[in-house]
Amino acid sequence: MKTIIYSFLTLLLFTLNGTAQIVTAKVVDEQQQPIEYVSIQLGPDYGVVSNAEGAFTIDLSKKGTADKVVFSSIGYKTIAVAVSDFTGGTYTMPIQINELDEVVVKKMSATQILTEVIKNAPNNYVSGPTKQTFFLRSSNDNKLINSEFELVKSSLIDKSTLKDLNKDIQTTMEKSKGKRSQDFSESYGYLYQQDKSSKLVVEKAVELKNKEKDVSGGQTKKIMEVLKKHIDPSSTYKVVSGWFTVDDSMKVSDLSKDKKEDIKTSSLKNRVKSLANTLNRFYENDELDFLTEFKRYTYTIEGYAPIDDATVYIIDFKPLKGSARYYGKIYVNAEDFAVVKMQYNLVDGKTSSKLNLKLILGVKVVEDRLKVNTTFAKNEKGQYAVNFVKEQKNNYMYMNRPMKLTKNKVDKKEEDKMLKIDILAEVDQQSTEELFIINNESLSGDQFGSVTETEKYDINYISKYDPAIWKDYNILAPVEAIKNYN
């Protein structure tokens, strides 16, 4: 009996000790405001990043020989807390920005510094085959500005029923106007790259969405629920919008179901690459004209900041000419002229992309209000690579299109049956993507060749936050909007 009790107590203590290794905490400034995307490092091989609310979760069992938890962020004083004293709670980082005459560095103008940045970039940033372990969180805040759906003509439904149907559908549409919905998706995996080739392997992916409240596409299901009461749900229909065939054999009953979309790996790979690769090779990106087109901008060296025993120039830039597209800040290591942090925002009135075919096809798409915040980490070889990116943008989408549903005949003698619909949808979407590169390691050609990328990957669809889903994964801590999602 004593042996059994002793074994039970040992197991209990081990379990409690293991649980206590996972610590959730928060990092704030001296005004108690959360500091986002702080690097919290536990030894050279393991670290996490605080989320947009300053919160983070760290696994102390991965400390190895480390005896301190180190907080670092450009513009703030680095703080270190003994692992033995690290029990969660709130940690404060004081602001630390030095004036020009307080630090001894080579006196250079902002444009001279940026010229050195471009000159040294090919040697400063990681090249060659790599394997990047990543976590990507995407969020969309959708607002339905306007929505109309009118049954114009039909040989499937009699006129009096058509009139009643339009009333029911319009009531449904009016209830949704001005409403907002939010959704989140998260994925964890590995991006393999060699020269211009790349492969992506997804280990886990989750989508958090309330489809009943979704205003970005959930209204279709509600409309089809009304329509299928009056249209043969077992028949198939050819769907045409203007000159374009949308579907040759659509079933109304299928549209009202909660179908899980087939997600192509290439789509996610392009998103990860567009965030990480574009910035890892920022010096080759002509779109970021503030790095080279000095006549378009005004530059100011605001001061210096310490980071990891180095001194960083803080360069502010603003538009000087109408052709300038951005404003923001660039943080440059004074020793090797590597950009260690970059923030740039699209000037008000400028667009990232725009498609206006409103008069011809009834379609308009505008992408603007772009904001990018990225940091770079230095490896043991002295080269840098992106370790975190946050991209925010606004998408405006307008569609005003006719649509015609023609019932596919089972028998040639069957009468022609069709339904004409006018659809209008106007949506404003604010999207945010946060990419955390957890690990970046070199790869051999043979290792790259052995990796297999699948065409599609599985997604775990949920409508309520589940903390167990990402247990034991090094990810960005969930924000309150995720934890309280319903």
Image (cartoon, grey):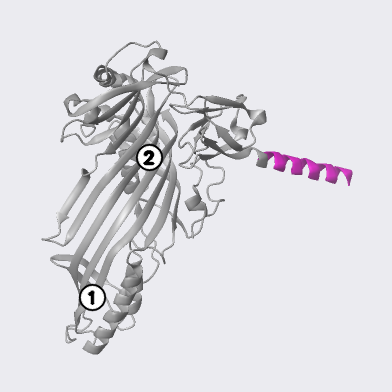
Span shown in magenta: 1-18
Q: Earlier in the sequence, mark 2 or mark 1?
A: 1
x%, y% of residue 429? 32, 54
Q: CA distance from mark 2 to mark 1?
A: 40 Å
Residue 269 visible: yes
Q: Residue at x 19, y 71 (%)?
A: 403
x%, y% of residue 36? 46, 37
Q: Residue at x 41, y 64 (%)?
A: 211
Is 80 placed left or right of 360 in the picture?
A: right
Q: Is the residue 175 above or below the residue 138 in the image?
A: below
Residue type, mark 2 in image: Lys
**Residue 5 drawn in magenta:** yes
Q: For the view shown, which residue lies furthest in the left direction?
A: 360
Residue type, mark 1 in image: Glu
Dominant secondary structure, magenta: helix
Mark 1, residue position: 150
Q: Quadrant of residue 260?
A: bottom left
Mark 2, residue position: 390
Q: Is the residue 326 above or below the residue 128 in the image?
A: below
